[in-house]
C-alpha cells in the first residue's frame, strides 16, 4: 500500500535558526537513506512556506489565480513523503522515525489510488 | 440449542477465522451473516453437530461465490487467498484467530470507544443496543463508530496480526480494557437477566490466551487473576429465585475454590514481581475478599488508596467509598460519595441510598433508591434495589 506521510509544521515558529536546521537536515537525511535502503521510498521533499503557495480555481470556464494557501492556519504542510509498505503498522513505524527526525507530528494517510 | 444461542456462541470465532481466510474484516462479517441466514432456512429443528464449523464452511463457500461474481482488485485478491488455503485444518478455529482479531480491533489508530465497540460486536457477538448501554451512549453513536472503524481498518490497511514484541506492550492497555469490559458485560448483563455466563467465559478464555502469549506482562496476569476471582463468586451471587445476593450475605461454601486458588497464586506472582498496576491492584482487592471467612476491610481500603493513585476515576472513588464506610463508618463515606460526579450511573445513587439507610436518614435513602431504580437497566439489579427500598419502610 502507498501512504502519504505529511509533515505538520507550525509556521509561526519560522524561520528556524540555521544551526537547528542543519541538525534537522542531517537527521532527516539519515532516515531518508534508511527508507531508500529498505525499498519503501517512493518520493518526498520539503516545501517552501505556505506564503509561496498559489491557488488556481476553474469555475464555469473562467480561471482565477489567487495568492496564498487554501487555509490561512498556523499549522501547514511543511513537507511530505510517499512510501510503499505492506500495512499501516509498517507505515506508522516509519512515521515514528520521521517524526523523531523532524521533531514535529506526522500525519499518515493511505492513498485511495496511485496513477 | 437454538440459532440465537449458536449465534451468540459462534459469531466472534467465525468472524475471526473468516477474517484470516479472506484477509478482510468486512467481507468476513458479510460472509458469516450470509451463513447464518442460510442456517435459518436450512437447519430446521436439527442444527448440525458442530454448528461453528458448519457456519465457517458455509461462510467460506458463500464468500467464494460472492467474490467470483465481483471483479474488483480486492475481490480477486481475496479470492486467490481463499483458494490457496488448505481446506480442513485451516477452516477449523485456530487458537490465535481471535487474538489476532482483538489486536486489530484494539489498534491505537482507532478511537478508544471504537476499539471496544468493535471488539464487543465482532468478538463478543453483542448487539449495538447492548454495547450502547454498557457505554451509556446513544445507539446511533455506537453503530456509527463501528461502521467508521471497519472502514478505517480496511482503507488505512490496519493489519490483521498479533503485534511483534517491540510494539506489543504499547498495544496491550487497550486490549486489557476491552477484555475487562466484555467480562463485566457478561457478569452484569446490561439487560434482562443478571448474568450472561458465556461472555464472561469468553473474556476469561481470551485473557488466558493473552497471559500465555505474554507471561512477562504483570498487568495481563493481574487481569486474569481479577477475572478468575470475580468469576469464582458467581455461584453465590444469585439466590435460589434469581435474586442478587451481596458479598456480605453470600454463602462462601458456594464459591469456586479452584478458581480462587488459581487467582490467589497469580496475585502472589504479581506481588513477587512488584510492578503494581490497576488490574493487579483490583485482583489483590478481590484476593482479600476471597481470603478467609470474612473480608479484611482495612486491607481493602489500603489497596483502594493505591488503586486511586493509578486510576483516579470517579468509579474507583465510589468503590473506595464502600471500603471507607466499612472502616470509618457511613458518614465519612457519604461525604466522599456526595463529591462524585457520575451521571446515569445507577450504582452512585444505590451506594448513597445504602449509606443514608445506615445513617437512619430513611426519607433521603428512599429517594436515592428511586433514583437508582430508574437508572438500573438490569432486571435483577432493579429487583434487588426495590427489595432494599421496601426494607426501609419496615
Image (tube, rainbow, N blue to C red):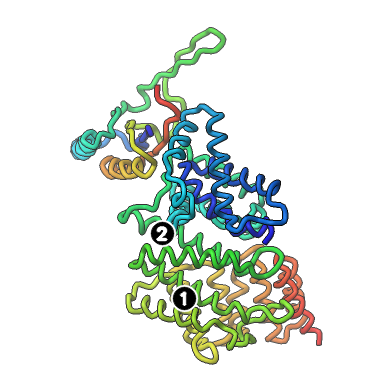
Q: Are marks 1 and 2 on the same chain?
A: yes
Residue B292 higher or lower than B18, as above or below: below
Classify mark 2: residues with Cα within 10 Å, few (<14), some (14-19) or many (20+). many
Q: Nearer the viewer, residue B228 or B306?
A: B228
Query: Which SS class for mark 2?
Result: helix
User: What residue does disc 1 label?
Assistant: B283
Q: What is the x, y in percent for residue B324?
A: 55, 82
Question: Left of B305 or right of it: where is B392?
Answer: right
Q: Residue at x 33, y 33 (%)?
A: A84
Residue plotted at (48% across, 53% down):
B92
- Return the residue nearer the eye: B107 or B331: B107
Residue at image position (38%, 73%) is B276
The residue singled out by tag 2 in the image is B172
Q: Secondary structure at mark 1?
A: helix
B60 on left or right of B221: right
**Residue B338 falls in which quadrant of the image?**
bottom right
- In the rendered image, residue B367, in percent from the top left (x then y), is placed at 76, 74
In the picture, measured across the screen, residue B265 lies left or right of residue B298, that is left
Quarter of the image with the N terminus of chain B in it = bottom right
For the point 60% across and 85% down, which residue is it? Answer: B254
Chain to which mark 2 belongs: B
Instruction: Determine whether B83 is above or below B88 in the image.
Output: above
1 and 2 marks in contact (CB < 8 Å): no
Number of marks in the rendered image: 2
Residue B47 percent across, percent down from the top left: 66, 56
Chain of the residue that carries numbered disc 1 in the rendered image: B
Lower sequence index among marks 1 and 2: 2
Task: Give left or right: position of B365 versus B152.
Answer: right
Rendered view: A1 above or below B102: above
State the quadrant of the C terminus of chain B: bottom right
Residue with the most extreme right position: B394
Camera sees residue B197: yes
Amino acid at each position: 500500500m502507498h501512504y502519504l506521510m505529511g509533515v505538520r509544521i507550525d509556521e509561526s515558529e519560522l524561520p528556524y535558526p540555521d544551526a537547528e536546521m542543519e541538525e534537522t537536515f542531517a537527521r532527516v537525511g539519515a532516515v531518508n537513506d534508511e527508507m531508500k535502503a529498505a525499498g519503501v521510498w517512493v518520493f518526498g521533499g520539503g516545501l517552501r512556506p505556505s506564503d509561496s503557495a498559489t491557488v488556481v480555481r476553474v469555475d464555469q470556464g473562467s480561471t482565477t489565480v489567487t495568492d496564498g494557501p487554501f487555509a490561512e492556519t498556523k499549522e501547514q504542510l511543511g513537507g511530505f513523503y510517499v512510501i510503499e509498505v505492506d500495512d499501516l503498522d509498517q507505515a506508522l513505524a516509519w512515521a515514528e522515525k520521521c517524526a523523531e527526525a523532524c521533531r514535529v507530528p506526522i500525519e499518515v494517510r493511505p492513498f485511495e489510488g496511485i496513477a | 440449542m437454538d440459532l440465537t444461542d449458536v449465534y451468540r456462541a459462534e459469531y466472534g470465532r467465525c468472524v475471526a477465522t473468516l477474517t484470516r481466510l479472506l484477509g478482510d474484516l468486512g467481507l468476513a462479517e458479510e460472509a458469516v451473516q450470509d451463513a447464518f441466514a442460510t442456517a435459518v432456512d436450512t437447519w430446521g429443528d436439527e442444527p448440525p453437530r458442530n454448528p461453528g464449523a458448519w457456519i465457517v464452511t458455509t461462510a467460506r463457500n458463500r464468500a467464494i461465490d460472492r467474490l467470483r461474481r465481483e471483479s474488483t482488485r480486492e475481490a480477486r485478491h481475496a479470492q486467490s487467498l481463499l483458494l490457496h488455503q488448505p481446506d480442513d485444518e485451516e477452516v477449523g478455529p485456530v487458537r490465535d484467530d481471535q487474538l489476532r482479531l482483538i489486536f486489530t480491533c484494539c489498534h491505537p489508530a482507532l478511537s478508544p470507544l471504537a476499539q471496544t465497540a468493535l471488539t464487543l460486536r465482532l468478538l463478543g457477538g453483542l448487539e449495538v443496543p447492548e454495547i450502547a448501554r454498557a457505554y451509556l451512549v446513544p445507539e446511533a453513536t455506537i453503530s456509527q463508530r463501528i461502521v467508521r472503524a471497519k472502514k478505517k481498518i480496511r482503507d488505512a490497511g490496519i493489519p490483521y496480526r498479533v503485534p511483534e514484541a517491540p510494539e506489543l506492550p504499547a498495544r496491550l492497555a487497550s486490549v486489557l480494557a476491552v477484555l475487562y469490559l466484555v467480562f463485566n458485560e457478561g457478569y452484569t448483563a446490561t439487560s434482562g437477566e443478571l448474568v450472561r455466563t458465556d461472555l464472561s467465559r469468553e473474556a476469561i478464555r481470551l485473557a488466558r490466551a493473552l497471559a500465555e502469549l505474554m507471561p512477562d506482562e504483570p498487568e495481563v496476569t493481574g487481569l486474569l487473576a481479577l477475572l478468575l476471582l470475580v468469576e469464582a463468586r458467581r455461584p453465590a451471587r444469585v439466590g435460589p429465585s434469581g435474586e442478587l445476593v451481596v458479598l456480605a450475605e453470600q454463602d462462601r461454601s458456594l464459591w469456586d475454590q479452584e478458581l480462587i486458588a488459581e487467582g490467589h497464586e497469580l496475585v502472589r506472582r504479581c506481588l513477587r514481581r512488584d510492578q503494581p498496576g490497576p488490574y493487579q491492584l483490583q485482583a489483590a482487592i478481590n484476593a482479600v475478599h476471597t481470603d478467609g471467612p470474612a473480608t479484611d476491610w482495612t486491607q481493602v481500603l489500603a489497596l483502594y488508596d493505591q488503586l486511586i493513585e493509578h486510576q483516579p476515576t470517579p468509579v474507583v472513588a465510589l468503590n473506595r467509598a464502600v471500603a471507607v464506610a466499612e472502616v470509618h463508618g457511613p458518614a465519612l463515606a457519604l461525604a466522599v460519595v456526595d463529591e462524585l460526579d457520575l451521571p446515569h450511573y445507577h450504582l452512585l445513587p444505590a451506594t448513597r441510598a445504602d449509606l443514608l439507610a445506615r445513617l437512619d436518614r430513611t426519607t433521603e435513602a428512599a429517594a436515592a433508591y428511586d433514583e437508582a431504580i430508574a437508572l438500573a437497566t438490569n432486571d435483577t439489579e432493579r429487583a434487588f434495589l426495590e427489595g432494599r427500598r421496601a426494607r426501609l419502610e419496615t
